[in-house]
Image (tube, helix red, strand yellow):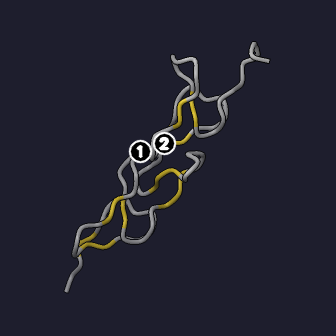
Amino acid sequence: SKSDCVPCLAGFYKSTQPYCTKCLQGFVSSQNSSSCEPCPAGKTSNVDNTDCINCPDGDYSIYGSQCNDCPISYISISGSPNCTACTS
């Protein structure tokens, strides 16, 4: 019924608003959360914002963000928090 409270699903949170809000990219939550937790550097959230996953090769991420491409002449391995300059 409409008088029953329904908990927020994983990937969403309820803070001061009376409704569930989806976590931002790079953040995750479990069911019935009041906030989202940031993913560590080198990781980002999956599409459902329920788990932190490694950024792919050639990408990096800072704490609580999406994966970003390494600049030209830089490389990274999966799950890396930064890029390394190529040496010739």
Q: Is residue 54 above or below residue 72?
A: above
Q: Is residue 27 above or below residue 46?
A: above
Residue ranking furthest to the top: 3
* Residue 76 place in picture, x, y as percent: 35, 70
Q: Are marks 2 and 1 in contact (CB under 8 Å)?
A: yes
Q: Is residue 29 left or right of residue 86?
A: right
Q: Amino acid at mark 1?
A: Gly
On the image, numbered disc 2 is attached to which residue? 27
Residue ranking furthest to the bottom: 88
Quadrant containing the N terminus in the rendered view: top right
Q: Is residue 80 above or below residue 74?
A: above
Q: How many residues crowd around disc 2 within 10 Å: few (fewer than 14), some, or many (20 or more)?
A: many
* Residue 70 place in picture, x, y as percent: 29, 66
Q: Secondary structure at mark 1?
A: loop
Residue at point 40%, 63% (across, down): 80
Q: How many residues crowd around disc 1 within 10 Å: few (fewer than 14), some, or many (20 or more)?
A: many
Q: Is residue 80 left or right of residue 88?
A: right
Residue at point 69%, 26% (across, down): 7
Q: Is residue 53 left or right of residue 85?
A: right
Q: Amino acid at mark 2?
A: Phe
Q: Secondary structure at mark 2?
A: strand
State the CA–CA distance, disc 2 to disc 1. 6 Å
N-terminal label among 2 and 1: 2
In this view of the protein, which residue sits in the foreground, 79 or 48? 48
On the image, numbered disc 1 is attached to which residue? 64
* Residue 20 place in picture, x, y as percent: 58, 28
* Residue 55 place in picture, x, y as percent: 45, 62
Residue at point 52%, 18% (across, down): 17
Residue ranking furthest to the left: 88
The image quadrant of residue 60 is: bottom left
Quadrant containing the C terminus in the rendered view: bottom left
